[in-house]
Amino acid sequence: MSNLEIIDLNGAQEALATIGITFSKKQLRRAAEPDAHGRRKMPFFVDPIDGRLKIDKSSLLRPYFERVAAAENHVKQ
């Protein structure tokens, strides 16, 4: 199994803040809510034990790091 670091909404807010992204708790909850088709904007899931929303930290941060890498690859040299 891979190295999972499962965090809750508070942990997600803190993890994003470490890279300069600030979301309010309300904004994070909105991103975690499923739309009419059951899809979420961010890959949160309901913890089967405590029923709270959780997310893998690397899954949360990966899109930001991928976009940074893509931007660096498209810089004129």
Image (cartoon, grey):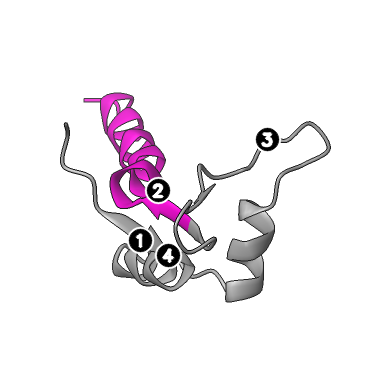
Query: In what element is the residue under mark 1?
Result: strand
* 52 vs 4: above or below: below
Residue 15, given in percent of the width and then of the height, sits at 33, 64
Q: Which portion, as a residue range, is magenta?
A: 54-77
Dot label at residue 15: none
Q: Which residue is mark 1?
A: 7
Q: Measuring 69% from the left and 59% from the top, which residue is drawn there?
A: 30
Q: Measuring 44% from the left and 58% from the top, which residue is drawn there?
A: 49
Query: In what element is the residue under mark 2?
Result: helix
Query: Dot 1 surroundings within 10 Å: few (below 14), some, or many (20 or more)?
Result: some
* 75 vs 50: above or below: above
Q: Which residue is mark 4?
A: 8
Where residue 39 sits, quadrant-wise, is: top right
Q: Which residue is mark 3?
A: 39
Give the alpha-carbon distance from disc 2 to disc 1, as whole Å.
10 Å
In magenta segment, residue 63: yes
Q: Which residue is mark 2?
A: 60
Give the alpha-carbon distance from disc 2 to disc 4, as whole Å.
11 Å
Residue 56, given in percent of the width and then of the height, sits at 35, 48
Query: Dot 4 surroundings within 10 Å: few (below 14), some, or many (20 or more)?
Result: some
Q: Is residue 9 left or right of residue 2?
A: right
Quarter containing the C terminus: top left
In magenta segment, residue 28: no
* 43 vs 52: above or below: above
Contact check, label 2 and label 4, Cβ < 8 Å = no
Q: Earlier in the sequence, mark 2 or mark 3?
A: 3
Badge 3 amino acid:
Arg
Residue 70, given in percent of the width and then of the height, sits at 34, 28
Contact check, label 2 and label 1, Cβ < 8 Å = yes
